[in-house]
Amino acid sequence: MPTENQMKDMKQNSIMGSSVTEGEIVCVTGGSGFIGSWLIKLLLERGYVVRATVRDPDNSKKVKHLLELPKAETHLTLWKADLAEEGSFDDAIQGCTGVFHVATPMDFESEDPENEVIKPTINGVLSIMKACAKAKTVRRLVFTSSAGTIDVAEQQKPCYDETCWSDLEFIQAKKMTGWMYFVSKTMAEQAAWKFAKENNIDFVSIIPPLVVGPFIMQSMPPSLITALSPITELISFYSRIQKRKVATFAPLTMLPLSILRKCSVTNTLNIMFPPSSKMWMRT
């Protein structure tokens, strides 16, 4: 007979270590964004009941495309939540079996990056993980991270794996365009892995580079505008590519891209199937 502690471990592993199946309730943070909206579309197609968090559910311009998705009327609800507000994701996550954390601040022009980008990103992911632990129903948390957490350094590597992290001292010294985003995502993911291990949370991290592809949101996503800037000659966006590549000593022809649908499918598959608690990398 197993001991009482062994029984608790077995019960905990059955909750946090199994896959999430169609028809169950899942939560998607940042639901109105580029990746989030496509992810919701795929989840609805697969029969999941989706709770999408947005900062303002009453802003029709931001959420109209979600409400018009097939099955949205019966399988989608919108929940108000903000990364800067501790505990604001608790209600949306309560009762969910899977959570996709996609939301992240993307203000490259912030005059106060510490309080407007870095802290909300780190505190936001920890708030969501605390909500998952509190709910006791979440079996897996899939985090959309960034290639900016592993490859921003003075010297580029021929191959990257789960032991690689961007050089925070180098980033803060160079302060290339978007530096606060690289710092925030790197520190947030490091904090997330630590929390996951300490609290036995089944955590999966996806590492996409610059994401491109068709979009269903109302306006063209910044990442797509940036990727197209060498063609459209939008200098303000093209400079983001130039400045980062100059800072990291990599040629412009090495700009890594990820196709949006593949990124969304990878998110979906990570909630459905093992293995878990691994770092999935998109190239």
Image: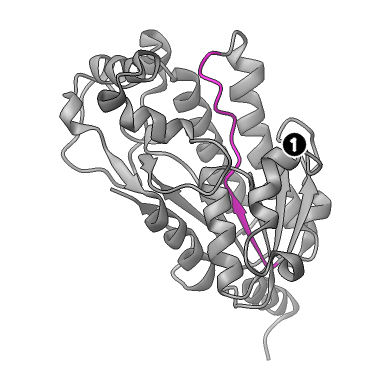
Q: Residue at x 57, y 46 (%)?
A: 102
How many numbered marks does the figure carry?
Answer: 1
Main secondary structure type of the part rendered in magenta: loop
The answer, for residue 212, to whether it is visible in the render is: yes
User: In the shown orientation, is residue 181 left or right of residue 174?
Assistant: right
Query: In this orientation, which residue lies closer to the viewer: 195 or 74?
Result: 74
To which residue does mark 1 refer? 82
Q: Residue at x 59, y 29 (%)?
A: 105
Amino acid on which disc 1 is placed: Asp
Name the quadrant of the N terminus: bottom right
Q: Is residue 11 above or below residue 258?
A: below
Q: Position of residue 250 (x, y in %)?
A: 19, 24
* Residue closest to the far bottom: 1
Task: Describe the element under mark 1 as helix, strand or loop.
Answer: loop
The magenta span reads: 97-109
User: In the shown orientation, is residue 171 left or right of residue 124?
Assistant: left
Q: Is residue 102 above or below residue 149?
A: below
Graded by Cα atoms within 10 Å as few (under 14), some (14 to 19) or many (20 or more), the crowding at tag 1 reads many
User: In the shown orientation, is residue 233 left or right of residue 128?
Assistant: left
Q: Quadrant of residue 16?
A: bottom right
Q: Is residue 50 above or below residue 260?
A: below
